[in-house]
Image (cartoon, rainbow, N blue to C red):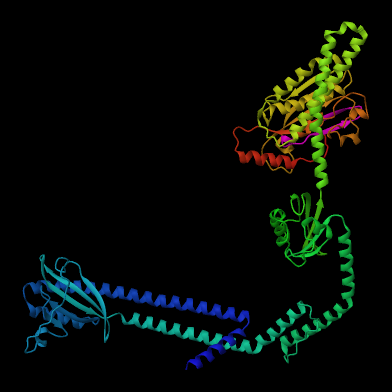
Amino acid sequence: MVNWFKTLAKAIAHWWADFTLQTKLLAAATLVVSLIMSGLTFWAVNTIQQDARTNDTRFGSDLGLLLASNVAPLVAENNLTEVAQFSQRFYSNTSSVRYMLYADEAGQIFFGIPFWQPEVQTSLSIARRINLPENYAANSEIPMVRQHVSPDGEVTDVFIPLLYEGRYLGVLAIGTNPNPTVVASSNLTRDVTIAVFVSIWVMVILGAVSNALMITQPIKELSTGVKNIAAGNFKQRIDLPLSGELGELIFSFNEMAEKLESYDEQNIDELTAEKAKLETLVSTIADGAVLLDADLQVILVNPTARRIFGWEGVEVVGINILNQLPMAVKVELSRPLYQIASGERDSAEFRLTLSEPSDRTVRILLTTVVNQQRESIKGIAITIQDITREVELNEAKSQFISNVSHELRTPLFNIKTHIETLHDYGEELTETERREFLETANNETDRLARLVNDVLDLSRLESCRIYHFDSVDLSQAVEQTLRTYQLNARDKGIELVQEISRDLPSVLGNYDLLLQVFTNLVGNALKFTQPGGMVAIRAYLLPTTAINEHLHASANQIRIEVSDTGIGIDTEDQQAIFDRFFRVENRVHTLEGTGLGLSIVRNIVDKHHSFVHLVSEVGVGTTFWFDLAVFVEKPSVTDNLSLMDAISKSKTFVKRSPS
């Protein structure tokens, strides 16, 4: 018997395995639906039955209370004959009453229908009684209800206390039959549900058998053939004697396999040659190159990339690149690689420092590889540039500037000391020699002092120092700047103009840094403006619509302009005017300068998350201008950062008119 069950179980398992996924899902769905429907139906039947029991209980209680109220006076008078007659009439006229029993205070039954207690006593004087709870007499106002199943069906028992003028006389027990209509309806519903459930499963089993015999086997053959084709076996063919749609499908599959086999034979050599050319080209470029597929597996890697990542002698082709990258690179590239592979972004660029296999700094560029229609991502191209030398040169340049600024302090001190010595012992020199010597030393001293100060300022601005930004009154900063250059402008015959809008709000910035910006711009303007010219400082509130159209922010900005009527700047010099140590006077005039003033201006404006622009024409004049955000009282940190980032991103390098 056990072996027979094992054989049957194996047969059923094999039969189930032949079903298609669609058939299995259909069977599972049918099972779930049928179980749900059956459960709902049985729940409804159970609810109906519960309601019927409740109604039966309520009906029995009402019926018992009605009868008890009528017979209680008769029982109190001990008029049992009238009790018997009334009970008989009540029993005869009510078809739902199964029995009625009367018991005294001790529970002894003294009358019952359809039997009477004295009639059932035998010669042994057997007495019947109702076993009630011990505290029933104390709570005799409350009817007691119960239900039990008898050989003739379910019966509802109701025990009603007999009370007359507050005196407990005994108890009346009534048994009632359930509602036959409700019982029949619930039984019918249950039977129909079982029949429907069985019918559904018979249909599902018949459909599954038909599917297994007529569809499953050909589909499995086709699935196996497609897998072989995908694996490169173009000699795969399917030979099944079928007609109809499946027969046409098998014929089309065989025809496709023949064409693929022919195409493969004709183009394999050409594809191999193209691949060899690509590998040769990639291997000769100076930068590292890695090609990945859409699953981040390495397809191609050149020797430079192997050397940078330490992959010499390691087979990485066909392996997920994240399993081979150095840990520092893996941490930075994991998320961008997944984002590019999923189409969330097109490219990414990183600058990393590698400690293995040797200390070096690299720039890594990630780019998507798409198909010809640019509809789907075929892979990811990774370019690795070794910028260690570039970084070293930048560090050397910074170190050189730091050393120069440090070393220039010593000659500056020596020159100043020499001047003081000449001042104390100058009688030995002629007047002309003393003046010439002092003038030369003083000019060099001022020049060295300016250079040192500018270099230190620029180095400080390019460092990672954090500056405190607060409310800045532009009117005060402009007035202080103009007072500083008032005498100089008067000596040169240049007019200083201040055009500050009335009730101009404060800006968010650093007062000392902005004062340095005004000082450098006004100083340059005076230096390059001929006598009789004009230098003007303007500040006004930009309307909201004038803020960059790409900046979706309600915060206003203030524009600051420094204009002059000087010699102007040639177009070819405007691109490099903000570079360090670049001096226009080398091309246009012979005025001296350090070439660091505008670099300092640009760095300070960058610190304020803005960008300095210029408009200039040779022989007409020059205007420098930039925008600053209006100070908002007690803003949250998050709002400040968001506003500054938005303003910074909105700036472009396009030169335009300040108006």
- Image coordinates of residue 386 in percent, x first then y, are 81, 51
Q: Is residue 152 above or below residue 428?
A: below
Q: Quick one: 419 or 351, which is closer to the camera?
A: 419
Residue 569 at least partly seen: yes
Q: Does the magenta stretch include residue 136?
A: no
Q: Single out the residue that lies furthest toward the top.
A: 427
**Residue 497 versus residue 464: which sits nearer the camera?**
464
Tell whether 141 sits left or right of 309. left
Which quadrant is home to the C terminus? top right
Magenta stretch, residue numbers: 604-623
Q: Quadrant of residue 255?
A: bottom right
Q: Does the image show residue 538?
A: no
Q: Which of 137 and 592 is in front in this view?
A: 592
State the image coordinates of residue 544 (x, y, percent, origin top left).
Answer: 70, 37
Task: Determine whether 466 is above or below 488 in the image.
Answer: below
When the figure is inspected, residue 433 is found, relative to residue 526, above or below; the finding is above
Residue depicted at 73% across the width and 42% down the height: 649
Magenta span contains residue 619? yes
Where 322 sits versus 226, above or below?
A: above
How many marks can you see? Answer: 0
Front residue of 453/306: it is 306
Residue 21 picture location, percent across and down: 62, 79
* Displayed quadrant of residue 83: bottom left
- In the visual, does 620 lie left or right of 185? right
Residue 651 in percent (x, y) is at 76, 40
Quarter of the figure with residue 507: top right
